[in-house]
Amino acid sequence: MREIVMDTETTGLDPNSGDRIVEIGAVELFNHMPTGKTYHQYLNPQRDMPEGAFAVHGLSEEFLSDKPLFADVAQAFLDFTGDSKLVIHNAAFDMKFINAELKWVDRPQLPWAQALDTLEIARKKYPGAQNSLDALCRRFGIQTERELHGALLDSEILAEVYLELIGGRQPNFALSVVSNNDTKGSANMAKWAPQQRQNPLRSRLTDTEVAAHADFVEKMGETAVWKQFK
């Protein structure tokens, strides 16, 4: 199962008021294990950077001035995400911006059902508690070591938080990892299954114990359940 853990940084809170995405970061998981494949892109919003937004992510208008427009990277972004589940903290916010940007460049919008909101998961699991990404990191003992928000860094942090929320960092005890050089990625990974031993283990029962058991079963009569497994 392929999942994309992602985050965005923006110029503000509402794309309908002219706010834009300035950074996208994403991390690929397969069977809840990081594959090492990531997507990261700074974007030129073609507008000023409000002080409040700059205080959050530290991305200035000058720094972003030579970065590509969303229109230039839209296809690469869609190619990376594909139809995989998008794991996002407060998904309504990021999906609103992503779909606005896609709409503005005449690209198909992502279905809301494709998003998995870790904020909703946290609220159900810890009702009444603080469930911001930072609060969950403190709860799970995850070291963030950051002063400013960054889309790729926050995606990597969220990946750890997500695995804790669903039951542990290796919830299904995956026994194989996708290589960073596997261009086909997780799609071709074979499912692990236990294999039959080439040479069966020797029985630990002695001949005397086997004979005693057979005698015991025989005394139970023809209807004994043990006789069904001979």
Image (cartoon, rainbow, N blue to C red):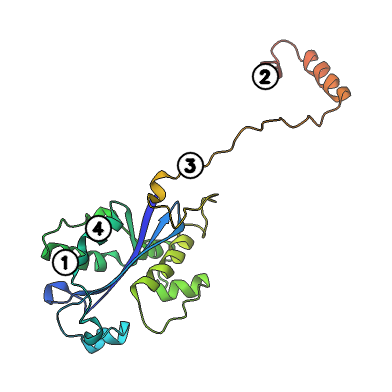
Q: Is residue 98 above or below residue 196?
A: below
Horizontally, residue 167 falls left or right of residue 230, namely: left
Amino acid marked by disc 3: Lys
| Label 3 or label 2, whichever comes before in sequence order | 3
Q: CA distance from mark 3 to mark 1?
A: 38 Å
User: In the rendered structure, which disc, 2 or 4, sits on the residue that comes first in sequence?
Assistant: 4
Q: Going from the N terminus, do you reach mark 4 or mark 3 first? A: 4
Question: What's the residue at 67%, 31% (across, down)?
Answer: 198
The tag earlier along the polypeptide, 3 or 1, is: 1
- Circle 2 — which element? helix
Q: Are marks 2 and 4 in contact (CB under 8 Å)?
A: no
Quadrant of the frame with the C terminus: top right
Q: Residues within 10 Å of mark 3 (few under 14, many from 20)?
A: few
Q: Residues within 10 Å of mark 1 (few under 14, many from 20)?
A: some
Residue 78, numbered label: 4
Residue highlighted by disc 2: 229
Numbered label tally: 4
Question: Mark 3 near mark 1, Cβ–Cβ under 8 Å?
Answer: no
Residue that label 3 marks: 191
Asked whether residue 169 appears in the rendered view, the answer is yes
- Circle 2/circle 1 CB separation < 8 Å: no
Q: Inspect the image, locate mark 2, and give the three-letter code of the amino acid beneath it.
A: Phe
Location of residue 105 in the rendering, given as x and y in whole percent from the top left corner:
12, 64
Mark 1 highlights which residue? 71
Q: How far from the left and from the top, in percent, is residue 150?
A: 35, 76
Is residue 40 toward the left or the right of residue 208 in the image? left
Badge 1 element: helix
Q: From what the image shows, is residue 98 above or below residue 219? A: below
* Disc 1 residue type (three-letter): Ala
Given residues 122 and 108, the one toward you in this image is: 108
What's the distance in space between the residues labelled 2 and 4, CA to CA?
56 Å
Residue 84 image position (x, y, % from top left): 32, 52
